[in-house]
Image: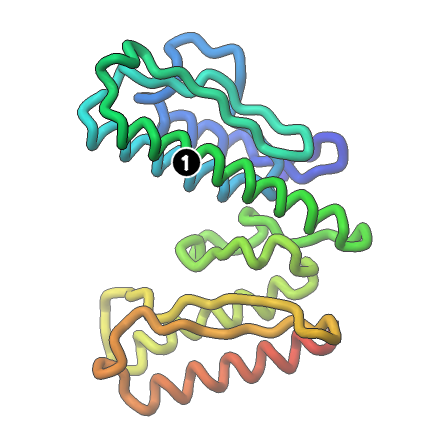
Amino acid sequence: MEMTEGWPMMSAEEVAALEGEMMPILPPIRGFTLAVPAIYQRILTDTLRAILKVVVDAGLVGKFQITRVAYQDVLSIRSQFIAPEKWPTEPRKEIERLIREAEARSDEAWRVATSSGGGKCISPSDISQDFDFMWTDDLLSMPAELIPAVETLFKVNDDITRHIAMDARRHWVEFHFHQDASGKWQATAMPLIEARKWIPGQALLLLQGLDVFNRTGSLV
């Protein structure tokens, strides 16, 4: 992982991949890069993907550009609507909302990271790519020493799949993390597959996984 001014940064490979994916909404000649600190990586990636979808769905590729991505405490995304008279109101409002939301999320991520007592917190690139789809911004303020416990909990999703001998990987459960009143890290789960498709053995695996993490989180 690259370092800039003490902050873990997106790697060159991650930046190149994102820039390639976002090419339809980037200027042909750019005076900026999409490289941002890792604590903003998921926020930026999710936002740009959502914006790209709005542009494509509206049939307005070539009529919108991201003109600047910067950060100083808060992520800043600047954009330009080309031939704005051709833009329907709703897609334009949705893009503006997505950018406002990204900046608000980055402000919270920065606040949490800088109030964590100086210890390293988890960033998206710290988690194995095997679990990329399970990332939640709840982890941005969690101490890095809990990474193994988080990944062990994420593996429960795959254990649930294997329990019924499924070959295809499925996203069975979404995990959320918080600190209780005493500062202990705790996890909760929200099933993403309807209840009637679960069997008792799967539910037991989930409860056991949560119990293990919550006992581990109390030791940090």
Residue sitting at x 51%, y 19%: 68
| Residue 205 occupies quadrant | bottom left
Q: Position of residue 38 (x, y in %)?
A: 59, 41
> In the figure, is residue 196 to the left or right of 78?
left
Q: Residues within 10 Å of mark 1 (few under 14, many from 20)?
A: few
Is residue 128 shown above or below 150?
above
Nearest the eye: 13 or 194: 194
Q: Position of residue 206 (x, y in %)?
A: 43, 81
Residue sitting at x 56%, y 58%: 138
Q: Position of residue 210 (x, y in %)?
A: 52, 80
Residue sitting at x 48%, y 40%: 101
Is residue 126 shown above or below 207?
above
Q: Position of residue 61 (x, y in %)?
A: 24, 20
Which residue occupies the extreme bottom position in the image? 200
Quadrant containing the C terminus is bottom right
Is residue 40 shown above or below 116?
above
Q: Secondary structure at mark 1?
A: helix
> In the figure, is residue 29 to the left or right of 214?
left
Which colour style is shown? rainbow
Residue annotated with mark 1: 97
Which residue occupies the extreme front position in the image? 89
Residue sitting at x 55%, y 73%: 187
Q: How many marks?
A: 1
> In the figure, is residue 3 to the left or right of 162?
right
Quadrant containing the N terminus is top right
* Amino acid on which disc 1 is placed: Arg
